[in-house]
Image (spheres, coloured by chain):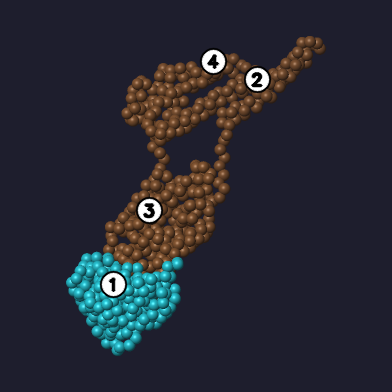
Chain colours: A brown, B cyan
Amino acid sequence: MRWLLGKDLLILRRSRLLVALLIFYPVAIALLIGFAISASPAKPRVAVVDETPPGETITLGGTRVGLDEYTKQLFSQVDVVHVPTRAIAESKVASGEVLAAIVIPSDIVAKISSGVSQAQIEVIYNGDAVEQSFVRSTIDATLARANLALSEQIKSVAVHDLNLLLSGGHIGPLGSQELIGLRQLPGTLKGIASRQPPGKDRDTLTRIAGFANLAANNLGIAADVLTTVSQPIAVHSKLLQGKRTPLDTYAVVVAVTISLMFLCVLLAAGGVALEREEHTIARLVRGLISREGLLAEKAMLAAVCAFVVALAMLLGVSAFVSLDVSRIGLWMLALAFGALGFGALGVAIGALAREVRAASLLAFLLSLPLVFLALVPSGSVATGLYDVIRAVSFVFPYKAALQALDAAVNGAAPSLGASIAHLLGVTLLFGVLARLGLRRAE
Amino acid sequence: MNARTAGEVLRVEGLGKRYGSREALQEVSFAAHAGEMLAVVGPNGAGKTTLLSILAGVQKPSAGTVSRGAGEIGWVPQQPAVYSKLSVVENLRLFARLEKVGDTEAAVARMLEQTGLIGRAEERIDRLSGGNQQRVNVALGLLADPPVILLDEPSTALDPGQRERLWLLVSELAARGTGIVFSTHIVAEAERYATRVLVLEEGCLLFDGTPGELARAGGGGDFERAFVSFLAKRSEHAQ
């Protein structure tokens, strides 16, 4: 087998363009996908027409909130382009200079301050279905955030006023006027009543004291109710298994696994298909090497080459992204078994395709969808479709290799051992398929 | 290479090959001798390549026996089975090592000399002419100095000049005592080079004799016409 390995390495050395393509193409694809996963999206450019008079404030229960506070929240998620008129905003949307325009009407302050009518802003947008969907979801999310900020301000004003009503305090200019609180009223009224002679006035005062007590007790929980209403659901996160994986290190894992897969599958498939194309398989398997040995040699060669490139990628990336290099032993384990799985898939493709071009095409046609299927999160598609995706991902080595490397690099679940066992199963499956594909040597 | 004495170098008994319900070979038996050039002829689909593939050990027979193992038989497939990105000498060296030939370099040198490829030894296969590629193909079949060599339609892709040189090389091998079994659909080659002819049709061995005997069995005259006539007679007889 070593002579055959030496021959394959010699052929690779003489195919420099092919080797360069085999390394740089998957690395480029991997980096693009990794960047797309980890990078936060750019802020969309949005034109804003503010028709409100400058310096206008919203008055809530005697407290003034600047409109700027609201718009600051509203525009924090977008790249604002201020324009003076609606017509200019519309022309910018039409020309595609901005993704959308937001018109803040002049009556917005009056409507918010009224507390009874709902204020409205207008969104103007254009583009195809994808752009429309993107604009709507961006603006909706931005508005939700701004509304939450505003309701927080309204809540804090309301809670302050409620506390004043309950506990008393000073109001008016410079706190000149003292206000007695509801909580003090029952005691005060009971004191006055006790000093009254028995009769109608005393009974009335006692009843008022009872009402004041009831009102104070019920208003006491109003602040909590307001907090709940302003933000009905708070998020408490709990990860079921493994540890939380940062998006950038996960992107590294995805990128490296993609490189590992492309390089390994293409090399292994090409290696076997080349033997067929050169008509040498028949010469080899008539006693010089067994079919199993031939397949193992191609898979091992591809796996070793892909392993070296993928490990170099991981080590190179670790200079820029925080990776725990002390886990390198686990990285190597995950990469080695992942490469074996991909090598088996590659030789199966090569054995079935029978010629190099067909094998390369089949390798691409199979590999790319596998990457995207493995990245589809549960819940993002219909249950039935997700089950199909999961089954397909389970049968091919990409997802298992991704999980193995994620476990090795990030300590994510499922465990490295489980993923390696999965990869061994997949390797066996494609090894058998490759052997069947090589049944006829001519 | 040592000159071999006359004698049986290959015996085939009751060879059969079945693909599903189709019988590709049925009860084929014959023997080949040292220095003999045995031509296997027959129409397309007669089973010539199947027979040679089984003798070469590339396929397993469904029935019957072959007296020698694949390792003792040289094989030259129909299309050159060589690595096009390697040079002539690299191909020879690789297969000599894979065949565990004792003295690799001596075997390579011998093959280069026998096939007249010394001047092309360092050239890559994909830069050689079809004729020279076929010479390398033959050289690979001879590396282990086998007592018998199988050539599957060796002249198919060659021009007349290349064909002539190839047959000269093969005839020299036979003259040195190597048993030659070759298949061909060019009947004239069988007449010109073979010492014995096997006629296969639909997997059955119809004739085993000299070219002269085949010509007589077909009614005499032009060999190709006699061959066609022989097949037609057999067909009528079968009906």
Which of the pair A267/A116 is nearer the observer? Answer: A267
Which of the pair B14/B52 is nearer the observer? Answer: B14
Q: Earlier in the sequence, mark 3 or mark 4?
A: 4
Q: CA distance from mark 2 to mark 1?
A: 124 Å
Report the amino acid beneath label 2: Gly
Q: Nearer the viewer, mark 1 or mark 4?
A: 1
Q: CA distance from mark 3 to mark 4?
A: 76 Å
* Residue bearing mark 1: B228
Q: Nearer the viewer, mark 1 or mark 3?
A: 1
The residue sitting at 28% across, 84% down in the picture is: B35
Q: CA distance from mark 3 to mark 2?
A: 76 Å
- Which type of secondary structure does the marked residue at label 1 adopt? helix
Q: CA distance from mark 1 to mark 3?
A: 51 Å
* Residue bearing mark 3: A364
Disc 2 and disc 4 in contact, CB within 8 angstroms? no
* Residue bearing mark 4: A173
Dot 2, crowdedness within 10 Å: few (<14), some or many (≥20)? some
